[in-house]
Amino acid sequence: MVSLLLILGLLVAAFVGFNIGGSSTGVAFGPAVGSKLVRKVTAAALFSVFAFIGAWTVGRNVIVTMSEGIVPAAQFTPVAGVGVLFFTGLSLLVSNVYGVPASTSMTAVGAIVGLGLATGSLNEALMFTIVSAWIVAPLIGLVIGAVIGRYVYPQLEVRLSFTRLERQLLQIDRSGRFPRIRLNGNASPRDLIGSALVLGIACYMGFSAGASNAANAVAPLVGNGAVSIDQGVLLAVAAISLGGFTIARRTLATVGDGITDLPILAALIVSSVGATIITILSYFGIPASLAVSTTCCIIGLGWGRASRAVTLTELATPPSESKPGPNLSTGALAAPSTEEEKSAGPTVGELASGEPTNPEQQYEESPSVPAIGEEDIAELTAENLFDPAATSQIVILWLLTPSLSVVGSYLLFALLL
């Protein structure tokens, strides 16, 4: 019976890792593949390498927290381990089938909390720290996004170029005696800088995914001693890599997580901020949701960009009936940052789907950026940055997913097991 449960636990852990790899590879490398910087196979290989580095270095801290910190390791019997992994796998199944951004980390923690409540072994002090981080981290993302949007984003937008190249960025030149690698001759210096950023941030996202998600697949197995931490990391990364080389081929074309409608620069910023927040939390052994942090960063980034239409004095002035104040919107990232009517650049979805971009919309020189308070507020709020319904869905699931996981897990372990 124990051997059967162990095999079942390993299979469920592999299933969880497989789905994590399938979804996370697309989110991280969708823009790079769409921009023809790398091929899908190369993207999966790079994601696997950096996910392994993240899991082997920082990720083991999260594994320790989830395998013996929230509840004692002795509580992870073979049955309990399978039960916790069941809820983690269920959240992934719901997320993939219905397209809702359910947090795997928060669901897994919720299932472990349910086990701790049912057995009276919950580490309440640690859970207070984890829940506090779940509240503070998105607020930090919101503030960082607002500051970048107001003071940095327009400057970056006019200096960086993000286009979809007709041929791969790195090519093999066979004209000489020996083949050699050369850069795409049609890529401008600004294209090269933008391409390096896209690829570098994609690898960083892979590192962050490995650091935060490996524990979701193997923590219960590490807790009951079925595998060691090192073996758990290898199992998780192997399953994540398999998902990256197989089902990620579809997600690489569609990306996901509600970021596809963002301009590519905005997507890179929120990805970097979100990945940094999650990596720092993982270093301290705290599991957290990347989707929530990036969503709050998107809101802050858009609001900060829109707030450039007014000065700090005008923002601080209380509105009145005669002067209702500026009507700021978070939909400002789609607006041009210069005085010329240029597009804000291709979106992540356009690059990932292979839609052509208009090279005439790219700046040949770095034009001047209007000063704060001089931009047209009507132009800044002309287009939507994100779907409010999708944002509300993420926030609701942020609260609902771990709550349902706690209740379901508690009922399972208290009444049935």
Image: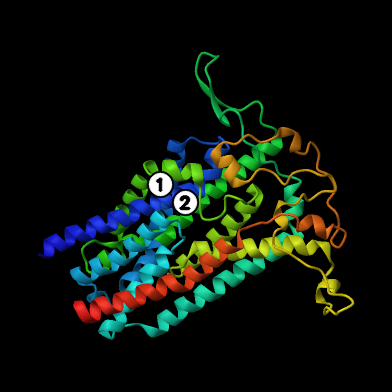
Q: Residue 76: where, in percent of width, then height?
A: 24, 72
Q: Is residue 132 above or below residue 147?
A: below
Q: Is residue 279 visible?
A: no
Horizontal side of 40 relative to 246 (left or right) equals: right
Q: Is residue 54 above or below residue 82?
A: above
Q: Residue 305: where, in percent of width, then height?
A: 74, 60
Q: Is residue 151 above or below residue 267?
A: below
Q: Is residue 403 above or below residue 177?
A: below
Horizontal side of 4 relative to 130 (left or right) equals: left
Q: Residue 65: where, in percent of width, then height?
A: 37, 71
**Residue at which label 1 appears:** 48
**Residue at which label 2 appears:** 206
- What element does badge 1 sit on? helix
Q: Which residue occupies the foreground of this view, 150 or 335? A: 335
Amino acid beneath label 1? Ser
Marks 1 and 2, the one that precedes in the sequence: 1
Q: Residue at x 62, y 35 (%)?
A: 164
Horizontal side of 297 relative to 75 (left or right) equals: right
Amino acid beneath label 2? Gly
Q: Which residue occupies the foreground of this view, 50 or 245? A: 245
Q: Is residue 170 visible?
A: yes
Q: Are marks 1 and 2 in contact (CB under 8 Å)?
A: yes
Q: CA distance from mark 1 to mark 2?
A: 7 Å
Q: Residue 54: where, in percent of width, then height?
A: 43, 56
Dividing the image into 4 quarters, which one contains the C terminus?
A: bottom left
